[in-house]
Image (cartoon, rainbow, N blue to C red):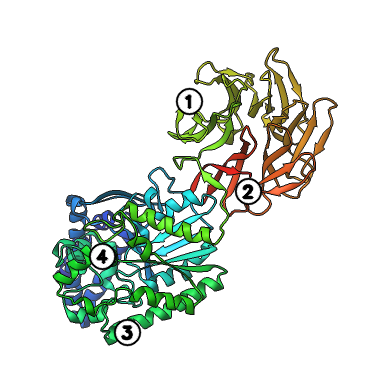
C-alpha cells in the first residue's frame, strides 16, 4: 500500500515537471511579455492534467490531452526560437483585426522596400499614417475631410508627404484631412469601418475611393477565421502560412498584379469588371456592391456628411502598353471587353444615390507623364499629385473658399511668427531636440537659420525695430519659472531683464522706437507665485513702470504704433480672458472685447487701425479681426482646428499665424483681401 502511494506521488511529480517543461512559463512569458499570463497558463495546464489523470474514467481524454500538450508545446517553442533566433525572417503584421474589417496597428515605424520604392511607414496612436517627424501621440478627434479606401489611398509606395491627401492639405491648409486607406479593403470593409470608427470623426465630406483594379470583385463580408488570428498573433505561423495565402508578384503570369484581368475565361467571367460576359458570381458581386454603396450613402447622410466617390482607373485603362500586355499575355479579344463599363456603371449608381462622382479616367489619360509604377500596380508620386490636382479642380469648381496657405516646411510645432520691421524676415519658435528653439527665416519660411542650441525652452520671440536684437521667454512654462531675455539676432550676448532669482516673466514685446519692452512678470513669495502683472521696462535706464495690479492674471502686452496705448489680456472678475486697452497718457483702462469667451494673442496693424486676435468662441480657437475705430468684429476663421498667435504683415494685407489642424501643425499665411 505504501509502495503504491509512493508511485502515485512520483507519478504526480513526474507529470507536474513534464507539463512545466512542455508549457514552460518562461517560454510563455517570452511570447506574451506578461508574467500573469505565463503563470496562469502554466498552472492551469498542471491543474487540468492532474484532474484528468486522477479520473480513471478519462483514459482516452488523458491521451488526447497529453497529445494536445505536446503539439502546443512544439508550437510555443517554435514561436520563441523563430522570433528570437530568426528575427530577420519575421513578416511584420501591420494590422489589427476588427469586426468585419481591419486597420493599421498604432505606433508602426516600418520601412517598405521594393525595386521601385523605399518608403518609411509610421502611424500614430490611432493607426493613422503620419510623417517621419510627426509626434505619434498626437491624435485627431474631428476632421473636415475623411478619405476611406484601399491601398491606392493608403499609398504605402510613396512617402507620407507625397500622398494625395498630404498634397491636398497644402492647397486646403485650414482643413483637417484624415487618410484612412488600408490595403485590401473593399466597399463592405470600408462601410463597417465608417459605421464603427470613421463616423466618430464627424467629417463634413467623406471621400470613398474606388479603384477598377479589384473593388468590383469578391464583394463579400469579411470574416476572420482561425488561420487569420493565428497569423495575426504568431510570427512563426505568419511565416509558415504567408505564401499559401498571398501570391508573390514574381510568381504571377506576367510578373505583376493584373487584376481584374486573368489568364482563363472563367476567371474573367467571374471577376473581370471589363469583361462583357458576366457569370452569376460577378452579378452577385455587383449586386453586393450596389447594396453596400446604398448603405454607405445612407450612413454618411445620417451622420450629417456628404459622400463623394473618387474612382481611380487601372493601368490598362490609361496605357495601351499595359492593356496590350494583358490582351496578348492572356489571349483576350479586345471585342470581349468594355473598358468604360465600371466608370459608366458607377456614375449611374452615384446618380441614383445622389452622390458626387469624381471620375479620374480622363485626367489620367490626358497626363503627359506616367502616373503608375512600371511593375507595381499602384500610383507613383506623380499619380498622387494628379489625384490632388483633380480633387482641387472639382472643389474649386464648387466655389470652395480658400484663403490660407501653409508656410512651415516641417510638422514640428512652429509657433509665434513675428515679422521684422522691414517685412523681409520672420522670427518664430520651433520644436527641436526635445525643446523649443528660436529661428530666423525669410518671409516665406523657406530659408531659416537656427538661433539657439541648448536644452532650455526659448519661446515668444519679438525682434527689435532695427532687427539687431530679439527679446523672448526662456525656461519651462509648466513650472512658472520663465525669464525674459534679450540677445543679439545671431544668438549671442544674452541679457536677462528678470534677473532677480524670485522674479519671473514671459511673452515680451518691443515698442516701435525700440527703447522699451513690455512683458508679464510675477514673483515667488512665501512658497507661492503671485498673479502675473504687466510692466514696461525702459532699456535706457532700466526703470520699470507697473501697468496693472496682480489681483488678476495679465499677459501678452503689446504697444500701439504711436506708443500711446498698451494692449494686453487679463482674466478679470468673470474668470475669462478679455483684451484690454491701457492709455499710457491718462492711465485709463478699457475692455475692448467684453465677450463671454476667452480671447488671446492681440496684435496691432502697423497703421494702428486694426487688431487681430485668437478667441475660443466655440470648442476651439479661431481668429478675429477688430476695427479699433468702429469696434466692428469680424471672424476670420471658422475651422475645426485651432488658430493662434496672429501677426500682421507690414502692409497689413495678410497675417501669419500658428495653427493645429488634426495631425498637422505649423505656421500659416492668410490673405485679408
Quote the CA–CA distance across marks 4 and 3.
32 Å
- Mark nearest the camera among 4 and 1 is 1
Identify the secondary structure beneath mark 3: helix
Q: Is residue 604 left or right of residue 573?
A: left
Q: Mark 4 or mark 3: which comes first in sequence? A: 4
Q: Residue at x 52, y 64 (%)?
A: 205
- Mark 2 = which residue? 621
Q: In which image quadrant can residue 468 be found?
A: top right
Residue 503's place in the image compared with 202, above or below, is above
Q: Mark 4 or mark 1: which comes first in sequence? A: 4
486 or 75, which is in the foreground? 486
- Mark 1 = which residue? 452
Identify the secondary structure beneath mark 1: loop
The image shows residue 436 at horizontal and vertical percentages of 50, 33
The image shows residue 549 at horizontal and vertical percentages of 78, 30
Identify the secondary structure beneath mark 2: loop
Q: Is residue 169 left or right of residue 317?
A: right
Q: Mark 1 or mark 2: which comes first in sequence? A: 1
Quote the CA–CA distance across marks 1 and 3.
66 Å
- Mark nearest the camera among 4 and 3 is 3
104 or 643, which is in the foreground? 643
Quote the CA–CA distance across marks 1 and 2.
29 Å
Q: Residue 149 — which label?
A: none
- Mark 4 = which residue? 231
Cβ atoms at labels 4 and 2 below 8 Å apart: no
Q: Residue at x 53, y 62 (%)?
A: 203
- Mark 3 = which residue? 283
Amino acid at each position: 500500500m505504501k509502495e503504491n502511494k509512493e508511485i502515485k506521488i512520483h507519478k504526480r511529480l513526474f507529470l507536474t515537471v513534464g507539463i512545466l517543461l512542455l508549457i514552460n512559463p518562461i517560454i510563455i512569458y517570452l511570447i506574451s511579455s506578461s508574467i500573469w499570463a505565463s503563470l496562469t497558463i502554466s498552472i492551469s495546464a498542471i491543474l487540468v492534467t492532474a484532474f484528468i489523470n486522477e479520473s480513471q474514467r478519462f483514459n482516452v481524454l488523458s491521451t488526447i490531452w497529453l497529445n494536445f500538450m505536446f503539439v502546443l508545446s512544439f508550437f510555443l517553442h517554435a514561436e520563441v526560437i523563430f522570433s528570437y533566433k530568426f528575427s530577420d525572417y519575421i513578416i511584420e503584421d501591420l494590422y489589427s483585426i476588427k469586426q468585419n474589417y481591419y486597420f493599421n496597428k498604432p505606433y508602426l515605424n516600418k520601412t517598405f522596400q521594393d525595386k521601385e520604392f523605399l518608403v518609411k511607414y509610421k502611424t500614430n496612436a490611432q493607426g493613422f499614417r503620419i510623417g517621419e517627424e510627426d509626434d505619434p501621440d498626437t491624435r485627431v478627434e474631428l476632421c473636415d475631410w475623411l478619405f476611406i479606401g484601399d491601398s491606392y489611398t493608403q499609398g504605402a509606395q510613396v512617402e507620407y508627404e507625397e500622398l494625395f491627401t498630404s498634397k491636398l492639405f497644402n492647397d486646403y491648409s485650414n482643413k483637417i484631412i484624415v487618410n484612412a486607406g488600408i490595403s485590401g479593403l473593399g466597399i463592405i470593409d470600408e462601410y463597417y469601418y465608417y459605421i464603427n470608427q470613421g463616423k466618430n470623426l464627424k467629417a463634413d465630406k467623406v471621400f470613398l475611393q474606388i479603384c477598377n483594379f479589384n473593388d468590383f470583385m469578391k464583394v463579400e463580408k469579411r470574416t476572420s477565421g482561425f488561420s487569420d488570428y493565428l497569423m495575426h498573433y504568431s510570427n512563426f505561423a505568419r511565416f509558415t502560412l504567408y505564401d499559401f495565402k498571398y501570391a508573390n508578384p514574381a510568381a504571377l503570369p506576367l510578373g505583376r498584379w493584373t487584376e481584374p484581368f486573368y489568364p482563363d475565361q472563367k476567371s474573367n467571367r467571374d471577376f473581370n469588371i471589363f469583361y462583357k460576359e458576366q457569370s452569376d458570381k460577378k452579378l452577385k458581386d455587383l449586386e453586393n456592391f450596389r447594396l453596400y454603396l446604398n448603405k454607405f450613402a445612407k450612413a454618411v447622410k445620417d451622420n450629417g456628411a456628404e459622400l463623394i466617390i473618387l474612382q481611380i482607373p487601372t493601368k490598362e485603362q490609361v496605357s495601351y502598353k499595359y492593356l496590350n500586355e494583358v490582351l496578348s499575355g492572356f489571349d483576350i479579344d479586345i471585342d470581349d471587353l468594355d473598358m468604360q463599363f465600371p466608370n459608366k456603371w458607377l456614375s449611374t449608381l452615384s446618380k441614383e444615390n445622389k452622390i458626387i462622382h469624381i471620375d479620374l479616367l480622363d485626367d489620367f489619360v490626358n497626363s503627359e507623364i506616367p502616373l503608375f509604377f512600371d511593375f507595381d500596380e499602384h500610383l507613383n508620386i506623380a499619380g498622387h499629385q494628379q489625384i490632388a490636382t483633380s480633387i482641387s479642380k472639382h472643389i474649386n469648381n464648387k466655389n470652395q473658399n480658400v484663403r490660407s496657405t501653409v508656410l512651415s516646411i516641417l510638422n514640428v510645432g512652429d509657433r509665434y511668427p513675428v515679422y521684422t520691421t522691414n517685412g523681409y524676415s520672420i522670427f518664430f519658435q520651433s520644436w527641436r531636440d526635445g525643446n523649443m528653439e528660436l529661428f530666423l527665416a525669410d518671409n516665406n519660411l523657406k530659408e531659416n537659420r537656427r538661433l539657439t542650441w541648448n536644452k532650455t525652452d526659448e519661446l515668444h520671440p519679438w525682434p527689435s525695430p532695427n532687427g539687431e536684437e530679439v527679446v523672448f521667454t526662456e525656461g519651462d512654462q509648466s513650472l512658472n519659472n520663465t525669464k525674459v531675455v534679450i540677445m543679439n539676432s545671431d544668438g549671442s550676448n544674452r541679457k536677462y531683464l528678470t534677473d532677480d532669482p524670485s522674479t519671473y516673466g514671459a511673452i515680451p514685446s518691443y515698442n516701435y522706437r525700440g527703447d522699451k519692452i513690455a512683458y508679464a512678470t510675477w514673483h515667488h513669495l512665501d512658497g507661492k507665485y503671485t498673479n502675473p502683472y504687466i510692466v514696461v521696462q525702459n532699456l535706457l535706464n532700466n526703470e520699470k513702470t507697473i501697468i496693472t495690479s496682480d489681483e488678476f492674471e495679465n499677459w501678452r502686452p503689446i504697444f500701439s504704433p504711436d506708443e500711446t496705448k498698451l494692449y494686453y489680456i487679463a482674466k478679470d472678475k468673470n474668470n475669462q480672458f478679455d483684451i484690454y486697452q491701457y492709455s499710457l497718457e491718462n492711465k485709463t483702462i478699457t475692455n475692448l472685447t467684453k465677450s463671454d469667451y476667452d480671447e488671446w494673442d492681440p496684435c496691432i496693424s502697423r497703421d494702428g487701425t486694426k487688431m487681430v486676435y485668437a478667441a475660443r468662441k466655440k470648442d476651439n480657437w479661431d481668429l478675429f479681426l477688430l476695427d479699433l475705430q468702429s469696434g466692428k468684429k469680424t471672424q476670420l476663421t471658422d475651422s475645426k482646428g485651432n488658430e493662434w498667435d496672429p501677426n500682421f504683415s507690414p502692409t497689413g494685407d495678410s497675417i501669419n499665424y500658428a495653427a493645429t489642424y488634426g495631425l498637422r501643425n505649423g505656421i500659416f499665411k492668410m490673405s485679408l483681401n
